[in-house]
Image (spheres, rainbow, N blue to C red):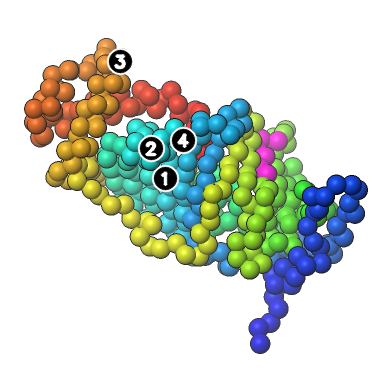
Amino acid sequence: MKTATPFRLALLGIVSLGGSSSGRGEQALPRQPALETIDQIRRLMHDRRDHLVSIKVEFRSWHQQNLGTARHERSVVAAKGGRRYALLWHGEFSHPEEDPRAYIQLLDGENWNVLNTYFREYDVSRKFAVRSYTDKILFHPVFESLGWWPPDDTNPPARQDGRRFFADDVVDDERCRVVGRELIDGRWCHVVEVANSDRLWIDCARGVVICQKRYASGGDHAEITAMEASDLREVSPGFFLPYRMRRIQRARNLDVTTVIDSYSINEVVDSQFQIEVTPGTLIYDRDTDTYRQVPGGFEVMDRVVRWVKANVQASERSANFNANQVAVMGLGGIAAGVAAAWAQARRGRNLVEKRVIDDEPA
């Protein structure tokens, strides 16, 4: 017979607490749960982390002013052990290969690789698989909002300048204390705090969900980041995850809402962390500063030429574009034409990315 762990006992509270009613009229408040100690909450957090070994999330993100419109980003992220995967493309395109700004980031445990799915340009590196380059995927807002770090990752949770960001790590801080309880969306949450730094609102009755989170600066203690999670749904027996998240970064004036389309829990396959190199892909080895191209892929070359014609002509002077290069490619001069057009496409694409990078929800 299995012993009832604190995690399982906490989940039994779902039955007694019940959910908030959507009916009209005055509703009785849910009964307050017994106040958990910080050590009990730590154990619940550790049980949750051990239960969730791998995850894959498909979602859409909007800046608040564009909420509900086609101006959004579509993404897929996955994590398992020390590996991470992130695919991003923009909502006006039905498929990543139609979007010139779409990319896949892959940290496979040893290499840090980035593929532009439109241009089929694949940057690979072993020496750049270090935190200063991989922070964006390790600190991905979805992973951070869930407060989860893979239990099989031998690396410690990502921190920035020593600052703890992931909820598992924050709760383990020896300064962390339970300071009370508050109702969030009709559910009682334990309020956990590192004084003048972090505050978490944790629903301990539904598999330990981080319903709200606030970061304050170390100096004047002003709030710098706020996160909210809602629309909690049961994704496996007794285990709940949010299907809607909101993240506000005061310093960057960012307010982004994320809607989850699907979760895959503990079913992430190893092939998720591999990128198929298809014909026409231009592989750039950043460690050796060398290029090689996978033979074939004429449709990719045609796509690059179309993009160059449509976008680089507007910046001929800054990119020093030579129109004869397009003619060379059109005549099938693969060896010289592909390299030249790819280089010009990279310069032209950088001009576009420079204008949009500060507006990326992720």
Q: Image height check: is 25 above or below 334? A: below
Magenta-drawn stretch contains 355: no
> Contact (CB < 8 A) between labels 3 and 1?
no
Residue marked by disc 3? 315
In the displayed structure, does residue 71 sit left or right of residue 344? right
Between the residue at mark 3 and the residue at mark 1, the CA separation in whole angstroms equals 28 Å
> Contact (CB < 8 A) between labels 4 and 3?
no
2 or 3: tag closer to the N-terminus: 2
Residue marked by disc 4? 91
Which of the two marks, 2 or 4, is nearer to us in this view? Answer: 4
Return the mark for residue 102.
2
Mark 4: which secondary structure?
loop
Residue marked by disc 1? 87
Q: Which residues are magenta?
A: 223-228
Query: Looking at the picture, which amino acid does disc 3 mark?
Result: Ser
> Contact (CB < 8 A) between labels 2 and 3?
no
